[in-house]
Image: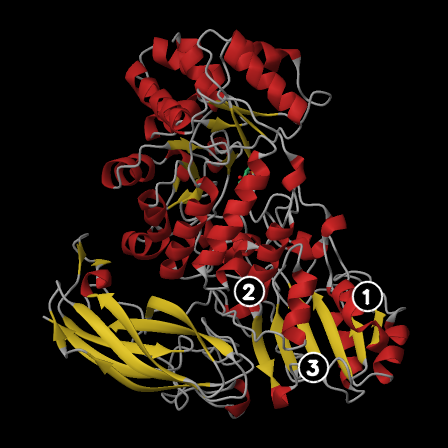
Amino acid sequence: MTLEEKIGQTSQRGTSSMGKGLSEELITKVRKGEIGSFLNVTDSQTINFLQKTAVEESPNGIPLIFARDVIHGFKTIFPIPLGQAATWNPDLIEKGSRIAAIEATASGIRWTFAPMLDIARDSRWGRIAESPGEDPFLASKFTEAYIKGFQGDLSSPTGMLACAKHFVGYGAAEGGRDYNIAIIHEQLLHNVYLKPFEAAVKSGVGSFMSSFNELNGVPATGNKYLLKTILRNTWGFDGLVVSDWNSVTEMIPHGFAADEKHAAMLSANAGLDMEMTSTAYEDHLKNLIESGVIAESQLDDMVRNILRVKLKMGLFEQPYTRFNHSIFYDEKHLVSAKQTAIESIVLLKNYNNLLPLDFKNQKIALIGPLADAPHEQLGTWVFDGESEHTQTLKMSLSEAYGKNLMFSKGLAFSRDSLTDKFDEALEIARKSDVIIFAGGEEAILSGEAHSRANIDLPGIQEELIHKLAKLGKPIVLIIMAGRPITISNIYNEADAILMAWHPGTMGGPALKDILNGETSPSGRLPVTWPKTSGQEPIYYNHKNTGRPASEESFVAIDDIPVGAWQSSLGNTSHYLDAGYQPMFPFGFGLTYSTFEYSEMTLNKASFSIMDSVLITFKLTNTGKAEATEVVQYYVQDITGSITRPVRELVGFSRVTLKAGESREVTYTLPVENLKFYNIDKEWVVEPGDFNIWVGPNCQEGLKSSFVVD
Ligand code: BGC
């Protein structure tokens, strides 16, 4: 290959279709073998034309890869990734991503920029919607499932190359403001942020994307430590690394590269194989190599990484797509999207067992801006799913229970500030037995560049809820949003609260089945839910501090006498006005039944590194309905060479029991899994005392302890 052809492989360009954006210049470049990949070409005629030009006319006949953000479905839209994480069900995630791959590859897309594996501890960050939540263990399980699903048999026509993004620290954006700097000390980086990415390498992911952010002062796109030391040398990754959109040239405003040439040099030397959209490589690599600034062997390595992936994908044997649009929104795909939506829904409150509702004998007033908003319930990062196929809550309820259902939006959209529809909403509410308020955030209020400093319900939704509450009827609050929403002001107004995230194409039927009790909710929070935005970042696996807060030590702002001096009482780590507890803890979620945990035992009291801890306990469904409990296992390493979190998730399983049924449940935890990256930068299990819990969330459950010697 000539230098130009090699550099061409490192270039990823965007264009939309034959009519729009496909310039003569681009076609000529493809013909000369000077482009390696395209993103966002979805028009079959253009895909075919470009591929044919590359394969039949370019000097080496190297096929192109067509890429797109297929994040939570292609046509059939599944819940947003944060909602999928709330299922705590990797099998569903694998099925969903396989379906996304089947639909996308039938359109010529063979590379998705997903899954996003950024640990997110701050719900102000808009892209928390697209994240696996705050926990590295749950995120790693989610990673394995996504990659298996997307890639399938990568060399087959439905194999879609997955991309572990954004490497790394993007979710730690300071203040939750998108693109902001990330300051993560080395142990935290290894023990939390890198874990899902390592799981991605172990799962055979074919590509990585470097992130927009700087990490401890060095932008990830030009970060040799990340891209070479960790990714290649420590983990042995042999796929390709692509930049994020213009993130090579964005190193200039970051203040890291002086100009585009410098940016190209820094990225190439750091080990970045392909540049997305900007053209620093195309414009400057040749000169950098000819002048000896970059060794040609460096470029050869980059090109090898790219070609290795193209070979693995079978693109040389089968470069062309058999377009098949008849499988879009296939019945089986819709069934799977519905099941994922059902299992993603988290029941947060159910006062007096208001839910499930008796639709046949009760008059229901359905109100709210998200009750019938086909586009909004699809969520962020939906380019291809069409809202005509969306089934909303209003559609599903009116189809099943039309006679007993009254509907009024109350507000045109989530941020609406007009009260002109309030009277109509109040009117139907007066005539009803139960009010369902479906509110939250429109899709555009979360996702990239859509961080919020205040994560209350937008607009005047709270005002409408207060007015409805005055009627004295029971209220079910359904939240559809890309993040936890702070609801302290309205918590007492709602009798039941369901978090439905942005549930996707089948959100309506899924919610109907939960509301009418056909199925019991089984979603659990993959993120800590704050009381107020000012508590962010908030996460369960925090450190204890030297002065941990407790019920006894906590002093509320109203308890401080006027004129009081700083006293030694209550000097613990909490907020005067928000305490130290979240609204709902990580792992939390109710069902239509109740579960009792009892008789926890461990197989022994002390273990060596080679052993496994065998946890056994009895789980009993003590309520009146069949339900699924997401059993969670947490460990605390009490003392370490660096301080350790108060609890860390080490396992989970879903157990379905009939009313009254009991089961002995066991879980095997290899002691080796308790390794952490310690003060000496080594992965070790440090001998000492450990606490262990089994329970329904990160704050409750049975406790035991053991020793590792
Ligand atoms: C996002 C990436 C995405 C890329 C291509 C960027 O703005 O950060 O996650 O894959 O665009 O659309």
The residue where tag 3 is placed is: 357
Residue 431: x and y in percent read 87, 84
Instruction: Decide if residue 365 is on the left or right side of residue 88.
Output: right
Q: Secondary structure at mark 3?
A: loop
Q: Nearer the viewer, mark 3 or mark 2?
A: 3
Rendered residue at 42%/46% (across/down): 148
Say if 22 sits above or below 90 in the image: above
Task: Work out whether mark 2 precedes mark 1 in sequence or the reverse, and give the earlier one.
Answer: 2
Mark identifier at residue 344: 2
For marks 3 and 1, give the CA distance: 24 Å
Rendered residue at 52%/93% (across/down): 561
Q: Quadrant of ligand 1?
A: top right
Residue 187: x and y in percent read 27, 55
* Label 2 residue near ligand 1, CB within 8 Å: no
For marks 2 and 1, give the CA distance: 26 Å
For marks 3 and 2, give the CA distance: 19 Å
Task: Work out whether mark 3 precedes mark 1 in sequence or the reverse, and give the earlier one.
Answer: 3
Residue 679: x and y in percent read 19, 57
Q: Quadrant of the N terminus?
A: top left
Res. 394 image quadrant:
bottom right
* Label 3 residue near ligand 1, CB within 8 Å: no
Q: Nearer the viewer, residue 419 or 162?
A: 162
Residue 513: x and y in percent read 65, 71
Q: Nearer the viewer, mark 3 or mark 1?
A: 3
Q: Secondary structure at mark 2?
A: helix
The residue where tag 1 is placed is: 411
> Which residue type does callout 1 highlight?
Leu
